[in-house]
Image: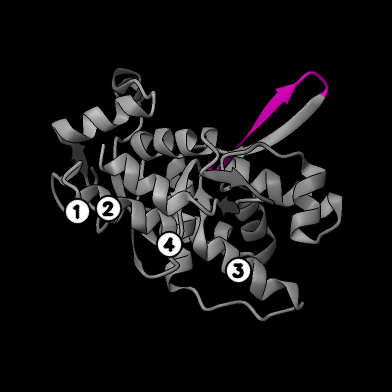
Amino acid sequence: MSDVSTPERDFGSVANLIGDPARAAMLAALADGRALPATELARRADVHPATASTHLRRLVEGGLIRVRAQGRHRYHEIVNPEVAAVLEAIAHVAPGAPVRSLDEPRATTGLAEARTCYDHLAGRRGVQLRDRLLATRALRRLDDRDHELTDRGQRLLVTLGIELASVRASRRVFARCCVDWTDRRFHLAGALPAAITSAFIARGWLTRGPGRSLRVADDYDDNLEKWLAT
């Protein structure tokens, strides 16, 4: 991994791309890993479609998003989970935006509780998942960033119907710390938490809400603890 202190890193260009409010809103809309059309991204950023096209072109040229064509339609998506992690890290230090409607505090509270960061669980429930996996010795730390499953953790995956070989075959990181803006602590990012999140959704422990939000089932905690006690 390159040293972030090396001069060849052009932080300014990326900061300029993300720092614009309209482009930041577009990136936030794409942070759950979904691909969206330009019209939807214009609506999310509250800008005219022509203005949105200019912003999207800059994000493509900057290497933060890419265009996926399906027939005559074009969709935009972030290029990899690392972009979502950058957005999450910036949210950790950025001041809160002014409240513009009575619905915003409720929406923010929901995102703080459970949301997707690209395709893995974030928010307080994401932090909780990492904490409980470590506490029950299903997961162990390799260093200050990365984690590995223990034998017990591997057995737990089987009970969720997750094939560890398939998870490891991914070209992504396996289980890495990702700063969560909710409580300034870590949730897990990578192929492992993505697989676990998908399994939780498939079982109804979590359900997708608007945007990046996830709804937590009433029996989520009971199901989580029963699974960890398997």
Label 3 vs label 1, nearer the camera: 1
Viewer-proximal residue among 199 and 32: 199
> What is the number of the mark on residue 132?
2
The crowding category of the residue bearing disc 3, from other C-alpha atoms within 10 Å (few below 14, some 14 to 19, many at least 20), is few
| Residue at position x 33%, y 40% in the image | 227
Q: How far separated are the C-alphas under marks 1 and 4?
A: 16 Å
* Residue 230 in sight from this viewpoint: yes
Closer to us: mark 4 or mark 2? 2
Percent coordinates x, y for residue 205 in the rendering: 51, 44
Per the rendered image, the range of residues in magenta is: 62-72
Looking at the image, is mark 4 or mark 2 earlier in the sequence?
A: 4
- Residue annotated with mark 4: 124
Point 29% across, 45% down: residue: 176
Q: Which residue in the structure is indicated by mark 1?
A: 135
The residues tagged by marks 2 and 3 sit, at their Cα atoms, a distance apart of 24 Å
**Amino acid type, mark 1:** Ala
Asked whether disc 1 touches disc 2, contact meaning CB atoms under 8 Å apart, the reply is yes
Query: Which amino acid lies under the numbered mark 4 shown in the image of this protein?
Result: Arg
Relative image position of residue 85 (x, y in whole percent) = 43, 51
Quadrant for residue 180, please give it.
Answer: bottom left
Disc 3 designates what residue? Answer: 108
Q: Indicate the position of residue 181 as horizontal and vertical percent values.
A: 44, 66
Which amino acid lies under the numbered mark 3 shown in the image of this protein?
A: Thr
User: Residue 104 sits in which quadrant?
Assistant: bottom right
Q: Which is closer to the viewer, label 2 or label 3?
A: 2
Q: Secondary structure at mark 1?
A: helix
Give the Cα separation between the discs numbered 4 and 3.
12 Å
